[in-house]
Amino acid sequence: AQEYYSKQKTLELRAIHIPTCTELFYRENPLKIIRCKGTYMYDELGNKYLDCINNVAQVGHCHPYVNKQIYKQMCLCATNNRYLHDNTVILAEKISKTLPKGLEQVFYTNSASEANDLAIRLAREYTGAFDILVLDNAYHGHLISVVELSTYIYKRMTNHAKIPEHVHVIPTPDVYRGKFRDIDYNFDEAKLCQLYVDEIRRTVEEAEARGRRIAIFFIETLQSCGGQIIYPKGYLKKTFDYLQSKGILCLADEVQTGFGRSGTHFWSFDSYEEGVIPDFVTLGKSMGNGFPVAALVTRKDITSKFDEDGVEYFNTYGGNPVSCRAAIAVLEVIENEHLQESAYTVGLYFLSELKELEKKYTLIGDVRGRGLFVGIEIVSDREKRTPGIEEAKEIRQKFRENFVIISLDGPDYNVVKFKSPMTFSIEDVDYFCSTLEKILKDMEKK
Ligand code: PMP
């Protein structure tokens, strides 16, 4: 009764109407999901899947409290941000309380791409500079302005598009696979941090010598699409301090990593070291638990540039009372159900179990994580750290056969990407790890 068309018919119609380039998981045999609850998804046959990747369903799929608040608000009023409404200010107040002092001005958007695009506009107005600094393998969205920053996308295009002149790309501080690797520097984290910070300094100085001026630096506070990367300690603070001392604004993209995911802190930029103070913070995905809502948070001195220049901001759906109500409900549930604390304890247990598997199976090159943001690097040669591209594909397929949904990412698609709903439990970890062990054992036997 929950299906309108048979799966075959859905596939046929999708082939006709939905551009093939539109992303689809398991393209050879896609899943048709018709019902979700908590950490689980159900297909048309009633099969139950463990969802390890949907960080939009932050407080669990189809959370009854969140859904009820959305419905109630939708029945009351669903206007726009041109009218006063308590939800708009209640949400902004709640968000700014979680952020460093001064970050209290909130632009509401429908997607994080829009929020990041707006940050570029504001940074250009504020600094008078034009250029953008970004990490390699970054992903910041799908609008022209932010696709240009996402080398992650460029590298996957057949005709590698040229990175525009105003975009300056610095190496990702990935100590496992990046330009400077832990094994080559005796696992000295402080040294690795400094080497990567020096790269930024060099890039900025070279750009300036060519007469370019940088307005803004974009960084995902844990790099997700680039392969679940955790930066060396000190990197964020040193980078921000250096750039901000030069008048370059720093944006923390918390789209994949915010709302308690890191376990220790509500925002991942806070999870490295003290005193990291972004000029902009981008929120999205998990913010509405599936209801479209995103935001850009910044300071008054930055937004007042728009006032001075007579720019008025309007976004048809951005900040409507319903999407704000959804986001308020998400914040309430994270607090009431102690989901950040759960991400911390479940995440620690998960990481320790994965480290045990890493000791036993050479197909695992590295495991890294913070809370419920975890990456498992699959390698075909552990010594050489050769990306296990085919092996990773096989693991993904076998996971699916065992009703576990993961995705692969990183420049070589060899990193098992984990960023589940925050309801992921100890039992879910056990199921995940026993399934992974079964898969690895079979593969290593071969
Ligand atoms: N930033 C990051 C880090 C993201 O992962 C994404 C989406 N995957 C975006 C920005 C863009 O978000 P949206 O799809 O809501 O525009």
Image (tube, helix red, strand yellow):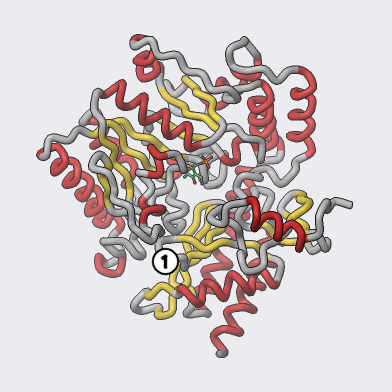
| Callout 1 secondary element | loop
Instruction: Tell me residue 20's x, y (percent).
Output: 57, 57
Instruction: Tell me residue 39's x, y (percent).
Output: 71, 53
- Which residue is outermost to the left? 209
Judging by the rendered image, the residue that carries numbered circle 1 is 412
Instruction: Tell me residue 349's x, y (percent).
Output: 60, 60
- Which residue is outermost to the right? 1
How many dots with numbers? 1
Position of 307 relative to 44 (above/below): above
Position of 404 relative to 297 (above/below): below
> Could you tell me if residue 345 is visible in this image?
no
Position of 282 relative to 222 (above/below): above
> Could you tell me if residue 16 is visible in this image?
yes
- Which quadrant is home to the C terminus? bottom right
Q: Which of the two residues, 228 or 264, is positioned nearer the viewer here? A: 228
| Residue behind label 1 places its C-beta within 8 angstroms of ligand 1 | no
Q: Which of the two residues, 158 or 354, is positioned nearer the viewer here? A: 158
Instruction: Tell me residue 413's x, y (percent).
Output: 46, 65
Type of residue at label 1?
Answer: Asp
Q: Residue at x 56, y 76 (%)?
A: 394
Q: Residue at x 50, y 22 (%)?
A: 106
Q: Residue at x 61, y 72 (%)?
A: 397
